[in-house]
């Protein structure tokens, strides 16, 4: 019998926001996969370790996921990572892949999932609290009410008209274009909040587009609502 690959969301940063199911799967399985060359440098690993100390005794599968623009290199990296997972699954053991937030929202495990399923392996996803839900709760701001729409954008790929539609906008992966994003937000007239490193020890909260710093980190998330909302 082949094992199952689990894509497990560990939430945005606060270990107390991990689900009971995520903790149980870590405790019940011996092989835990984490993105990166060294588990200790993985944010997802450190979050999970705080919630499930048993993780330190598990067999770790460190999978390098290339963060480059070269599609051929990206594919080769994903294929190599999937093959390492498949080797474990072929032995009958499950693999629990830890990922920040939720495994269905801009998650690198999605690429591995496609390969594994195409190769005939079983994959299950375990939802985690998405960063934009945790950030809204941290701010005490409802994401949507009544008939409001919710739009989630990867800001690094956002076009200039993305903020023109009514409703609440969540901008993720904003750091590399933060100056441009801030200017666009100022021009939009929307109410703006940003949470950096939500739920982590180095969390920072900014209220208003003008307060967004130029040194915003990678895990920075922006919520923008209509002025009259």
Image: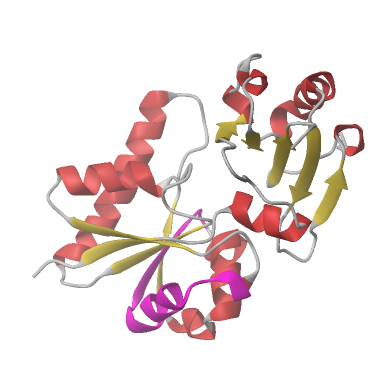
The residue most toward the right is 210
The residue most toward the top is 160
Q: Nearer the viewer, residue 161 or 84?
A: 161
> x, y percentage for residue 2?
13, 66
Give left or right: position of 131 versus 192.
left
> x, y percentage for residue 52?
52, 81
Quarter of the image where the N terminus is located:
bottom left
Q: Is residue 33 above or below residue 136?
A: below
For the point 24% across and 57% down, the residue is 123
Quarter of the image where the C terminus is located:
top right
> x, y percentage for residue 113?
29, 48
Q: Is residue 171 above or below residue 20?
A: above
For the point 81% across and 35% down, the residue is 191
Q: Specify the segment rendered in magenta.
A: 16-37
Q: Is residue 73 above or below residue 14?
A: above
Regarding residue 42, the answer to whether it shows in the image is no
> x, y percentage for residue 13?
64, 63
Q: Is residue 200 above or below residue 173?
A: below
User: Residue 18 in magenta?
Assistant: yes
Give the image quarter of residue 77: top left
Give left or right: position of 205 versus 168.
right
User: Residue 166 in magenta?
Assistant: no
Q: How many marks?
A: 0
Q: Nearer the viewer, residue 146 or 23?
A: 146
């Amino acid at each position: 019998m082949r094992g199952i690959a689990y894509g497990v969301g560990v939430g945005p940063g606060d270990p107390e926001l991990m689900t009971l199911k995520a903790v149980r799967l870590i405790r019940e399985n011996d092989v835990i996969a984490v993105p990166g060359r060294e588990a200790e440098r993985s944010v997802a690993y450190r979050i999970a370790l705080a919630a499930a100390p048993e993780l330190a005794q598990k067999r770790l599968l460190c999978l390098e996921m290339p963060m480059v623009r070269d599609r051929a290199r990206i594919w080769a990296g994903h294929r190599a990572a999937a093959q390492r997972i498949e080797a474990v699954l072929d032995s009958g053991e499950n693999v629990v892949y830890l990922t920040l937030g939720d495994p269905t929202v801009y998650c690198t495990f999605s690429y591995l999932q496609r390969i594994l399923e195409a190769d005939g392996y079983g994959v299950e996803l375990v939802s985690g609290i998405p960063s934009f839900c945790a950030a809204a709760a941290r701010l005490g701001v409802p994401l949507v009410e009544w008939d409001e729409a919710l739009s989630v954008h990867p800001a690094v790929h956002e076009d200039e008209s993305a903020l023109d539609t009514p409703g609440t906008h969540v901008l993720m992966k904003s750091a590399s274009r933060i100056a441009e994003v801030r200017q666009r937000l100022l021009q939009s007239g929307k109410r703006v909040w940003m949470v950096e490193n939500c739920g982590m020890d180095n969390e920072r909260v900014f209220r208003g587009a003008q307060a967004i710093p130029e040194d915003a980190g990678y895990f920075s998330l922006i919520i923008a609502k209509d002025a009259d909302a």
